[in-house]
Image (cartoon, rainbow, N blue to C red):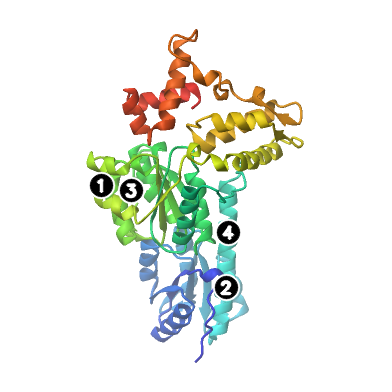
Amino acid sequence: MEYPSDAPAGGQRLQILVVDDEANIRRTLAVCLETEGHHVVGVSNIADAMAEAARRSFDLAFIDLRLGTDDGLDLIPALQSKSPWLKIIVITAYASIDTAVEAIRRGAADYIPKPFTPAQISLAVRKVFEMRSLEQKVAALQEDLGQEHPEVDFSSSNPRMKKAVDMARQAASSEATILIRGESGTGKTILARAIHGWSRRAAKAFRMVSCPSFSSELLESELFGHIKGAFTGAIRDNPGRIAASEGGTLFLDEISDLPLALQPKLLRFVQDKEYERVGDNVTRKADVRLLTATNIDLESAVREGRFREDLFYRLNVIQVEIPPLRERLEDLARLATGLLTFHVRRNHRSFLVFSDEALSVFREYLWPVNVRELSNVIERAVILCHGERIGPELLPPRLTPADACHQIGDPVSLEKVEEQHIRRVLASARSLQEAAKVLGIDQATLWRRRKKYGI
């Protein structure tokens, strides 16, 4: 028997469950599907099917209509209650219009009579693959709804930035974990999305978790999920971001803020792709690629006992470092022009350009919050501009050279001196931790000062 050798579009691999009480059928389907690059798990009964569905996430299930004394149709709603995205194809030697209609009514995506050919199976799988890809794209669009992003341009005249982008592109095609390093606002999240888009997982989900945004307990639930009743307020099951990223990429931003208690659990997932939901003892598996980012010196965190050394080396297989904006000023005019185009369109304005004086101010400023700050400054100028040209008068006072050069003893408030000093220290420090140490304050106080001064 010959099997189709062409894999699904984009080379994507599906996780497929085969439920049939005939061993020969399970073997035939496994050979046909594995030849196309899919991962197949075969079982003979409903109990084993439910057990496998509890342990891992499947994209597709082939279910025989008759499983000994059990009815395969009863398995359809049971499986989909655990995995609402699961597509089901019913296979049977007792094909009839009535059973086909009933299978579709209960949630099956397709219905194939026995005996079937490899070409029929291949076509059915392709249809499911296209359906899952479309659903995941819709889910990604819904997640981004209302969040407009500037068009990303990774071209650069700066050698360090070019090296970072080249390394990211090269590593994207692998399955290696990637640690993206850089100051706040340099574009670590944008690069993580690009790495996913350049990878073989691009058609699958991209999910993001910001580690500082959650308490330790909520972060565990957000990552690994929880079952109903696991803790106060857990009124329904939550599959978690890992399960939601099945086949795709999970990006953990500011990984240095991952609590120590959660680090062994993440290490286990990185090593074995296994985890448990909060309140559940069922071990689950997931095919998810991990990307992480940090704006601090993780090696120092390891030495100080705040970050596990073994987890650090597991995450730091490939390290990509994005230089701060002040160290790649040759890219500044191009970045500013691209952001101006974005904010003009977003705010429904007519054509605008920067004056030479405004660009000169940009080049003189240290940009402590990098591209994020540049974007905010340009958005403000677009909103305030009444003509066709953005000049220095439309830029925040902190950017102008006269305002940036106050000396001790000048007739300015202590608050203004403090703001400028914090900005300069942030611009020269390698991390927020280092800046707080130079300033003689803790990171929480520095965070409050940055919020106060809009840094």
Q: Where is mark 1, residue-wise?
A: 308
Q: Where is mark 4, residue-wise?
A: 135
First in sequence: mark 4 vs mark 2: 2
Q: Where is mark 2, residue-wise?
A: 126
Real-space CA distance between mark 1 and mark 4, rounded to the nearest whole angstrom? 37 Å
Q: Quadrant of residue 131?
A: bottom right
Q: Where is mark 3, residue-wise?
A: 278
Horizontal side of 370 relative to 396 (left or right) equals left
Q: Nearer the viewer, mark 3 or mark 1?
A: 1
Circles 3, 4 touching at the beta carbon (< 8 Å): no
Q: Nearer the viewer, mark 2 or mark 3?
A: 2
- Pick the residue in front: 57 or 180: 180
Is residue 359 shown above or below 400? below
Q: Is residue 239 visible?
A: no
Q: Describe the element under mark 3 as helix, strand or loop.
A: loop
First in sequence: mark 3 vs mark 1: 3
Q: Describe the element under mark 4 as helix, strand or loop.
A: helix
Q: Quadrant of residue 289?
A: bottom left
> Residue at 50% of width from left, 39% of height from top?
325
Q: Which mark is residue 444?
A: none
Q: Describe the element under mark 1 as helix, strand or loop.
A: loop
Circles 2, 1 touching at the beta carbon (< 8 Å): no
Q: Nearer the viewer, mark 1 or mark 4?
A: 1
Query: Identity of the amino acid at label 3?
Result: Val
First in sequence: mark 2 vs mark 3: 2
Real-space CA distance between mark 3 and mark 1, rounded to the nearest whole angstrom? 22 Å
Q: Is residue 12 visible?
A: yes
